[in-house]
Amino acid sequence: MEKIVIEGGAPLKGAVRVSGAKNAALPVIAACFLAQGTHRLKNVPHLKDVQTIKTIMSGMGVGFSEENGVLSVDTAEVSGYFAPYGLVKTMRASILLLGPLLARLGRAKISLPGGCAIGARPINLHLRALAAMGVDMFLDRGYINATVDRLKGAKIFFDIPTVTGTENILMAAVRAEGTTILENAAKEPEIVDLADFLRAMGAHIEGDGTDTIVVEGVKELSPAPEHSIIPDRIEAGTLMIAAAITKGSVSIEGCRPEHLAAVIEKLHSAGATVREMQNGLVVQGQDPIISVDIETMPFPGFPTDLQAQFMALMCIAKGSSVIRETVFENRFIHVSELRRMGAEIRIRGNQALVVGKERLLPAPVMATDLRASASLVLAGLVAEGGRTEVNRIYHLDRGYEALEKKFQALGASIWREKI
Ligand code: UD1
C-alpha cells in the first residue's frame, strides 16, 4: 500500500500536459470487440482502470501490446465472454463490455457491479434498452447472463441521461439490424469520441453530442486506421482548480476549452483568471478566492466528477457557498475528511454549505473514492505547517496518471511513500 505525502503552501507554477481521458479510453477499448482485427489507439492513459479492462478482455482472448505510445488491441480471435466479479467489483465501467460482446458474439456473462461509494448507481437503464433490442437476460449468482441471436434496432428513451448506458447501447446498435434511436441520451464529449471511433470503423451514427442519437445498424465493421483518445477534461479541471487553490499560475496544455466551459465560468466567478492559449488554457489564481455556488449537472453543466475538487477550493474562499449535487446521491463522503483539515461544511440532503476559512490544516486523511481523493490532494497543497498524508490512494491511481509527478513538476512538495 502507498500513501501520498504533501507539504503544502507553494503556489503551483509552470506548464503541465493533460493525459488522455479515462472515461473515453474505456468505451473505446471495449468497442474494439466490434470489428475483427487489430486496432491502434493513441493517447491511452496509463491508469488502473485501463489495466482492469485490459485484464478482463485478455481473459476473453484479446491481445494487447504497446509501442511508441500506440496501444494495439487485437480482437481477431475472441474466445470468451465472461467478466468475473473479482475484477468488475473494482471498476463499474466493466459493464461497458456488455453491448460490444452481444454485438460480436451474441452472448455475455458479466458480474453485476455491486455497491459503490458514491451511491446506488444501478444499471437498469442499460438492461432495459438491451431487452428492447431483443436480448434475453437472467441473473444467476450475481451474474447477468445475456444472449441474443441478432440485435434489433429499437426506439429507446432513457429516463435519465446515463453516460455508460448511452455508450453501451450505442455500441450494441451499430451492428444491430435496422435503426436505433436513443432519446434523452447523454451528451458528454466522451460519447462523441466513441461515436467518432465507431464511425471510423464504418458505423452510421448521427446526433451524438445532442440528446437524440440515430444509429443505422451495419452487418460488419472494420478496424479504424488509428484513433487518438480525447484529453481528460476532469484531469484538466482538477489541474485548473489546483492553480486557483494555490494562487499559482499554470498552463494546462492539450486540454479542450470547449469541454470545460462550466468550470471556466465558475473559476472566473471565484476570482481566478482563465485565458485560452493555442493549445489549452492558462489559469492564474487570485487572492482572495471568492465563494460561488455550484450545482452539478450532466454535460455541458458543471461535472459531478469535479464537485469534490471545487469544494476543496471553496473551503478557503471568502464567504459561503452552496454546492448542490444532483447527479449522484451520497457524493459528499469527502466532506468528513475535509473537516479533519479544518473545513467548515454543513450538509443537508444533496446540498453542502461551505463556510470559507482562512486556511486548511495538514492532517492524515483517507481517500474514499476517485474524485474525493483528488480533492484531498488539492486541500493538502494549501495546508501549511506540516504534512498531509492521503491514504488509500489506489482510488487516485484508478483515474489520474502520475498526478503527484505533475504537481512536483509545478513546484509542489508532494511524494509517494510505502506504508
Ligand atoms: C459516468 C462516468 C463517471 C461520471 C458519471 C456522471 C464513466 C466510466 N464514468 O458514470 O465518471 O461521474 O458518468 O457524469 O464514464 N442511473 C440509473 N440507472 C442506470 C444508469 C444510471 O438510475 O441504468 C443513474 C445513476 O445512478 C446516476 C445517473 O443515472 O444517478 C447518471 O449516471 P451515469 O451517467 O450512468 O454514470 P456512469 O455512466 O456510471
Image (cartoon, rainbow, N blue to C red):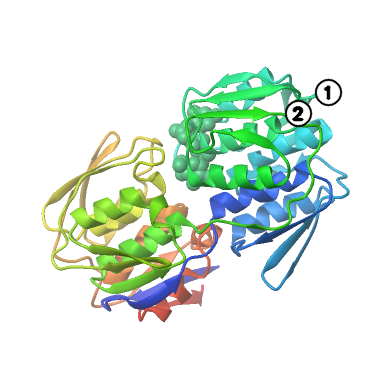
Would you say residue 236 is visible in this rendering?
yes
Percent across and percent down for residue 128 are 61, 21
Residue 13 in the figure: left or right of residue 145: left
Q: Nearer the viewer, residue 185 or 23?
A: 185
* Residue at 53%, 62% in the rendered image: 397
* Residue at 37%, 78% in the rendered image: 410
In the rendered image, the vertical position of residue 282 relative to residue 83, given as above or below: below
* Residue at 11%, 53% in the rendered image: 319
> Mark 1 — residue?
149
Percent across and percent down for residue 77 are 88, 48
Classify residue 208 by image quadrant. Answer: top right
CA separation, marks 2 and 1? 14 Å
Q: Amino acid at mark 2?
A: Asn
Q: Do the residues bearing badges 2 and 1 touch, measured as CB atoms within 8 Å?
A: no
Residue 259 in the figure: left or right of residue 352: right
Residue 292 in the figure: left or right of residue 362: left
> Mark 2 — residue?
145
Q: Nearer the viewer, residue 224 or 114?
A: 224
Q: Amino acid at mark 1?
A: Asp
Give the structural element (helix, strand or loop) at label 2.
Answer: strand
In the rendered image, the vertical position of residue 298 relative to residue 12, given as above or below: above
Would you say residue 364 is visible in this rendering?
no
